[in-house]
Image (tube, rainbow, N blue to C red):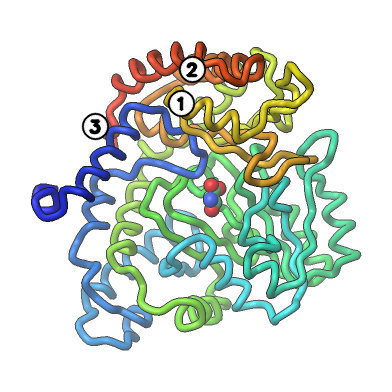
C-alpha cells in the first residue's frame, strides 16, 4: 500500500482505520466474511485492466486469451464444487444474478412467488422498492406464525391459487434449513420454474452442511462473498439445456464488461472451497452459531424459530422492555456497535416497525469463525450481547454494560488476527 499512501494519504488513512475497526471489533454481520490474502491478490491484480465482453472463445475484444483461461477455470471449478452442469460467473452481484434469471425466464408482469422481505426474504425477490417488485407481479409467502419456520403445505396451497411462473426459495434472514426439494416439487405441481438463491448459505451447501439445491431446482443463484468466503460478486448455476438462455441474459441482457479481476478471485475462492479445511470451517460455523444461540436462549432472549441450523441467529427484541416501548433493532445495533460488536437490525415475523428501525437483530458467525474463534468464544460473545441488550433495555441512556463489554471485546479481538495462518 506504500504507493497509495504516498500519493493519496487520505484514502490510505481511511482504509487503515477500517482495517483497525475490523481487527479490534467483532464483526457479526451474517452476510460478511474475510477473504484470504490469495483472493485479495487476485482481486487487486492487472486482470482489472481488460474489457472481455462475451464469453470464453467468443469475445467482443481482442487480447482475451488469458481472460478466457481464467473464466473457464472459474466456471469449471464452480461446476465441480457444486456438481452443476453449467455455471455463469459474470454477475457483478447476487441481485444481478437474480435479475438475470428473471430476465431469462419471465415476461413483464409475470407472477413470482417468494419469501417476504420482512419474514426473511431479500430485496431482489420482488420487494416493492426494488425494480423486481415493479416489473413483475409479486406474491409473498411468509413463515408459520407459531413455529416461525417455512410451512410447505401453506406454500403449496398458495402456489395453487397464485399459479406463479417462478417460485423463489432462499433467504437472507432465515435461520433454519430450507427444503429445496419440497420447493421444486411445489413448482412442478403448478408448472412453474423454481429458483434457489443460496447467497447466504452457499459455503454450507458446497460442503454438505446444508442440503444443496444444485441439480434439484431449475436454477441456482448465489453470491461469492458470504459463507463461500470469496470476492464480492454473484454466480448462477443451471442445466446444460438452460445454459445459453442464462448466459445471454447475463450478457448482453443485464451487464456489459465482466469484472475479470473479480472472476480471477472467484476462481481462487472456488479452489479454496474444495479444500478439506474449508469443509471444517463451515462445520465450525454451524457449531459456533448453535453455541451462541444456546447462550442467548439461556439468557432469556427470544430467538426467532427457537434456534438456528445455519450461520445466523435472528433475535426478537419485543420482549426487552421496561417502560412499554421495547428496545428496537436500531437501538440494539447502536448499543452493540458502541461495545465493538457489529450486527444489523432486522425485521422479524409480524414486524410492526419500519425496516430502518425494526424489532429484531441478525447475528452471524462466518467472520469470527474465519478468525479462528470457536464455541467457547461464541458463548462469551453471547453473554456480552445479552448483557448490553438487557442494560440498554432497562435504561436507554446507560453506558455501563457498553463500557465494560467494549474492554473485553477489544481484549478478545486482539488475540485473533484477521488473517490466521489457515486462511
Ligand atoms: N444485503 C445482504 C444481506 O445482508 O443479507 C444480502 O444481499
Q: Nearer the viewer, mark 2 or mark 3?
A: 2
Say which of 408 and 12 sits in front.
Answer: 12
The answer as to whether callout 3 falls within 8 Å of ligand 1 is: no
For mark 1, give the secondary structure.
helix
Say which of 19 and 46 sits in front.
Answer: 19
> What residue did someone put label 1 on?
338
For label 2, the crowd category at 10 Å Cα-Cα, with few meaning under 14, some 14 to 19 and many 20 or more, is: many
For label 1, the crowd category at 10 Å Cα-Cα, with few meaning under 14, some 14 to 19 and many 20 or more, is: some
For the C terminus, which image quadrant? top left
Q: Residue at x 86, y 66 (%)?
A: 162
For mark 2, give the secondary structure.
helix
Q: Are marks 3 and 1 in contact (CB under 8 Å)?
A: no
**How many angstroms separate mark 2 from mark 3 (CA)?**
32 Å
**How many angstroms separate mark 2 from mark 1 (CA)?**
7 Å
Task: Tell me where residue 111 sits by quadrant.
Answer: bottom right
Q: Position of residue 381 (x, y in %)?
A: 49, 19
> What residue did someone put label 3 on?
421
Q: Position of residue 34 (x, y in %)?
A: 36, 41
Q: Residue at x 64, y 31 (%)?
A: 308
Q: Is residue 93 visible?
A: yes
Q: Position of residue 289 (x, y in %)?
A: 55, 28
> What residue did someone put label 2 on?
402
For label 3, the crowd category at 10 Å Cα-Cα, with few meaning under 14, some 14 to 19 and many 20 or more, is: few
Q: Earlier in the sequence, mark 3 or mark 1?
A: 1
Q: Earlier in the sequence, mark 2 or mark 1?
A: 1
Determine the residue located farthest toward the front in the rendered image: 397
Amino acid at each position: 500500500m506504500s504507493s497509495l499512501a504516498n500519493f493519496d494519504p487520505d484514502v490510505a488513512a481511511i482504509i487503515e482505520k477500517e482495517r483497525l475497526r475490523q481487527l479490534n471489533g467483532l464483526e457479526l454481520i451474517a452476510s460478511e466474511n474475510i477473504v484470504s490474502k490469495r483472493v485479495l491478490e487476485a482481486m487487486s491484480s492487472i486482470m482489472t485492466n481488460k474489457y472481455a465482453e462475451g464469453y470464453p472463445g467468443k469475445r467482443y475484444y481482442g487480447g482475451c486469451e488469458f481472460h478466457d483461461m481464467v473464466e473457464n477455470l472459474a466456471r469449471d471449478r464452480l461446476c465441480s464444487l457444486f456438481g452443476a452442469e453449467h455455471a455463469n460467473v459474470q454477475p457483478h452481484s447476487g441481485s444481478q444474478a437474480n435479475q438475470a434469471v428473471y430476465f431469462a425466464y419471465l415476461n413483464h408482469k409475470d407472477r413470482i412467488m417468494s419469501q417476504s422481505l420482512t419474514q426473511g426474504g431479500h430485496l431482489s425477490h420482488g420487494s416493492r422498492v426494488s425494480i423486481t417488485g415493479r416489473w413483475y407481479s409479486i406474491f409473498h409467502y411468509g413463515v408459520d406464525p407459531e413455529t416461525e419456520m417455512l410451512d410447505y403445505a401453506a406454500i403449496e396451497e398458495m402456489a395453487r391459487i397464485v399459479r406463479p411462473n417462478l417460485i423463489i426459495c432462499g433467504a437472507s434472514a432465515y435461520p433454519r434449513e430450507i427444503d429445496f426439494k419440497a420447493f421444486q416439487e411445489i413448482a412442478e405441481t403448478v408448472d412453474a420454474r423454481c429458483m434457489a438463491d443460496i447467497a447466504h448459505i452457499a459455503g454450507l451447501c458446497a460442503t454438505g452442511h446444508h442440503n444443496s439445491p444444485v441439480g434439484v431446482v431449475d436454477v441456482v443463484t448465489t453470491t461469492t462473498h458470504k459463507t463461500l468466503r470469496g470476492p464480492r460478486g454473484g454466480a448462477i448455476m443451471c442445466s446444460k439445456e438452460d445454459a445459453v438462455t442464462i448466459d445471454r441474459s447475463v450478457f448482453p441482457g443485464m451487464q456489459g464488461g465482466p469484472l475479470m479481476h473479480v472472476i480471477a478471485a472467484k476462481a481462487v475462492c472456488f479452489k479454496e472451497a474444495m479444500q478439506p479445511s474449508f469443509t471444517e470451517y463451515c462445520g465450525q460455523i454451524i457449531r459456533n452459531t448453535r453455541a451462541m444461540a444456546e447462550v442467548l436462549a439461556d439468557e432469556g432472549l427470544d430467538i426467532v424459530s427457537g434456534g438456528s441450523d445455519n450461520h445466523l441467529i435472528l433475535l426478537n427484541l419485543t420482549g426487552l422492555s421496561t417502560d412499554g416501548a421495547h428496545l428496537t433493532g436500531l437501538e440494539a445495533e447502536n448499543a452493540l456497535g458502541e461495545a465493538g460488536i457489529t450486527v444489523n437490525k432486522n425485521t422479524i415475523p409480524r414486524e410492526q416497525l419500519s425496516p430502518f428501525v425494526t424489532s429484531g437483530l441478525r447475528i452471524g458467525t462466518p467472520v469470527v469463525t474465519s478468525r479462528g474463534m470457536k464455541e467457547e468464544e461464541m458463548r462469551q460473545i453471547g453473554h456480552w450481547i445479552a448483557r448490553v441488550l438487557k442494560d440498554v433495555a432497562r435504561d436507554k441512556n446507560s453506558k455501563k454494560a457498553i463500557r465494560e463489554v467494549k474492554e473485553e471485546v477489544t481484549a478478545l479481538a486482539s488475540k485473533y488476527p484477521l488473517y490466521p495462518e489457515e486462511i
